[in-house]
Amino acid sequence: MTSKPDYLTSARRTLRLEIEALQALDAHLDGEFEHACELILACKGRVVVTGMGKSGHIGRKIAATLASTGSPAFFVHPGEASHGDMGMITEQDVVIALSNSGEVAEVLTLVPLIKRLGAGLIGMTGKPASTLAQASDAHLYCGVEQEACPLNLAPTSSTTAALVVGDALAIALLEARGFTADDFAFSHPGGSLGRKLLLKVRDIMHSGDELPRVLPGTLLRDALLEMTRKGLGMTTIMDDGQRLIGVYTDGDLRRTLDQGLDLQTTLIDRVMHPGAHTIDADQLAAQALFEMEERKITSLVVQHDGDTVGVIHMHDILRAGVA
């Protein structure tokens, strides 16, 4: 009877071998890595990534990571490059070519063409003495002692190593360029990440007639009617010059009732909370959510250039998909 495969032992062995392969890469980071960074930073065109097979899949991801972190890049399949797509590469570009052996025919076919163009060439291989490595202007070592595959055949540890070296290159370039969160947001306008990085308080705040406000001296009864009309669970108290004096919330109402105060005769001035937690209209909505969670409140008064311009509620942020 065949025994049940030990899936967990196999998985743990794979993780251990790939972790060991990555740890060994640190000793191979040297001036070649720095030179590769300088080539890309000086590039006036695009970074063109190419690779065959599994290296090609890793190359696509590296190109995508570079493009999203401030280094314009795209992937070209080496086979397609030999049949017309070589025209996508110009003398102003830098080519990153991936090949673990450094001897893949489809990639090597492109090397003399890249050289003739005058484009920069960065080789990513596991063999520093290989044809590709020797022909490159900068060589990034991605070699491993052993693949995680028990046959030592299927690209596993080696592709992980190439991917991580590509990430290291992208992040080093990001930091060198002074790439900011706003820059990152420009490359990621869609989805929850884009909303977190792009959506500002002013985009979703309640302003104009939607802003709950009463004057000092207003009866508490009338302030409660304003809160009900605007539906935000609070109202601001502002003078004729729109200067913020305080706020009154649902929580304050509960405390008012506990004190047995008459809603018909009590003035808002007596029970309001002086001042308020505020945020600038140009702050990110994600920052507003963070401040609400930190202070355990559900709304913030929005100000800009010293003026009160709106109110933002936690429900607004959640509806916008920022959380």
Image (cartoon, rainbow, N blue to C red):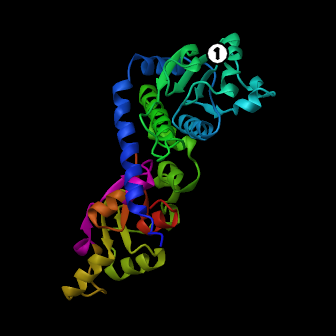
Side of 141 where 220 appears, left or right? left
| Label 1 crowd (10 A; few <14 / some 14-19 / many >=20) | many
Q: Is residue 181 above or below residue 300?
A: above
- Residue drawn 39% across the image and 61% down it: 8
Total marks placed: 1
Asked if residue 307 can be seen in this view, the reply is: no
Q: In the picture, residue 83 is in which quadrant?
A: top right
Magenta span of residues: 269-289
The question of residue 274 being in magenta is answered with yes
Question: Horizontal and vertical percent for residue 263?
Answer: 30, 86
Q: Residue furthest right?
A: 84
Q: Nearer the viewer, residue 6 or 196?
A: 6
Question: Horizontal and vertical percent for residue 228?
Answer: 44, 80
Q: Residue furthest left?
A: 259
Q: Is residue 152 above or below residue 295?
A: above
Amino acid on which the number 1 mark rests in the picture: Ala
Question: Horizontal and vertical percent for residue 38?
Answer: 48, 17
Q: Nearer the viewer, residue 57 or 173?
A: 57
The question of residue 176 being in magenta is answered with no
Side of 323 where 255 appears, left or right? left
Q: Is residue 12 above or below residue 225?
A: above
Q: Which element carries disc 1, helix, strand or loop? A: loop
Side of 2 where 92 appears, left or right? right
- Residue drawn 81% across the image and 27% down it: 84
Q: Nearer the viewer, residue 147 or 124?
A: 147
**Mark 1 highlights which residue?**
119
